[in-house]
Amino acid sequence: MTVTGALPDPTSLPARPELDPNTRIMHVLTESTGPIADVAKVAVAGHVEAGHEVAVAARPEVFAALDMPESALLRHIPVAIAAGPRPGDPDAALTLHKYYRHVDLVHAHGLHAAAVAGLGFTGLPAGRRPVLVATVGRFGSRNVFAKTDAALVARTASAVLGTTEPVVEHFADSVATVERARLMRADLDRNVRPTRSKAAVRKALGIQAGTWLVASPVELVDHTALTTIVDAATQLSAHRADRRWTVALSGTGGLRGLIGKEFARPGRGLVLADHDDTIDLLAAADVVLASDRMGDIDPEDLMQLAKPVVFVGTERGARMWGDAAFATPADSTEELLDAVFTYIDSPAARGAAGIAARRRVDDADSGAFLAEDLRALYAGLLSGATWV
């Protein structure tokens, strides 16, 4: 299986340096609930307990909801930062700017928190800027505000901790240190679960018992990966006549009618499924074909289903799948067929890929060592050590 961007094995890496007890830390928060806020809470408490001077920059109601024990080492800095853009963001950034000369490291929890924290660097000489660590959760890559925030974070952060592998991949080429964030619970916008059984889905599609179902949610528009997938669908039976095959496409797009007319015919092994049934279809499939273009189906959605995946597309797009998928070029029908056959011939490969996919979006840790792990990360960044 092609490994394209998997995290390193921590046991194979050198130990991180110790954090100076005099290190002054600022945490910037926009929310008091959610997977990212859960970690922020244990981090603040743990860092105060370790003897660090800690400031929390947040709205008063957010700070109060953290329910921190009183300590001479803990200070609240009231700033009006919300989870998304607000007219007061420049004022909030200016407030942070004024405090930066008193801190060594800033950890912003959330994409917009990190963007405002980075905006606070404006006018500061490089040598007087604190190290900025950003924990970034899932965000819509098509959302113009999120894209603007992400671009600012990429320019100002020393390290990004992404809550899922696609987030990690987004910043991999623009930020010096990028790691998977350790969470106490998964950062998922929605829990993707099928509503119908595999048998019901196959019956609705008219698929005979013993037929291997290959499904894909790719957009049905003019792009190379779609051409390759359709080409492979028409060749499966010719290459492996010992098995029965059906390839089901559930995507939308201007070519749906043409594909239905020219290719989705009896005996061709290709059918068009209702787009509204995409999650049920993918959950019922033996193998799923993904690409850079899957419409409203996010990679994280597909990873939750724990299915063996063949990614058909760019090298950059493949990296977010790591060891959870075979990666094949967008224009190689032969390599796509080989990957499908490898899965079909190996139950172990299918099972391993499914488990790996789920772990890329749902991998939680206990809170006991999260604060200490962050302190170790901070020490590496402040000392200039390389960890990833």
Image (cartoon, rainbow, N blue to C red):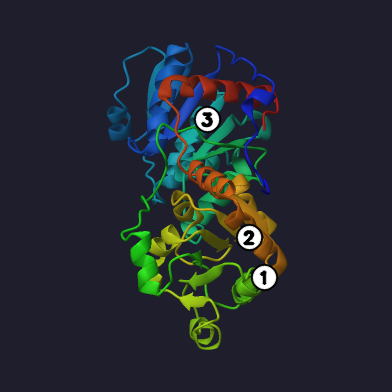
Dot label at residue 106 = 3
Q: For this view, does 240 lie left or right of residue 102?
A: right
Q: How many labels sit on residues? A: 3
**159 and 301: which is toward the camera:** 301
Marks 3/2 in contact by CB < 8 Å: the verdict is no
The secondary structure type at the circle numbered 1 is helix
The secondary structure type at the circle numbered 2 is helix
Residue beneath disc 2? 341
Q: Is residue 371 above or below residue 202?
A: above
Amino acid bearing label 3: Val
- Residue 338: x, y in percent? 68, 61
Marks 2/1 in contact by CB < 8 Å: the verdict is yes
Q: Quadrant of residue 284?
A: bottom left
Amino acid bearing label 2: Phe
Dot label at residue 239 = 1
- Which of the two labelled residues, at mark 2 and mark 1, occupies the earlier sequence position? 1
**Which residue is depicted at the point 64% across and 23% down?**
11
- Residue 86: x, y in percent? 39, 50
The secondary structure type at the circle numbered 3 is strand
- Residue 305: x, y in percent? 44, 52
The span from disc 3 to disc 2 (Cα, nearest Å) is 49 Å
- Which of the two labelled residues, at mark 1 and mark 3, occupies the earlier sequence position? 3
**282 and 72: which is toward the camera:** 282
The span from disc 2 to disc 1 (Cα, nearest Å) is 10 Å
Nearer mark to the viewer, of 1 and 3: 1
**351 and 29: which is toward the camera:** 351
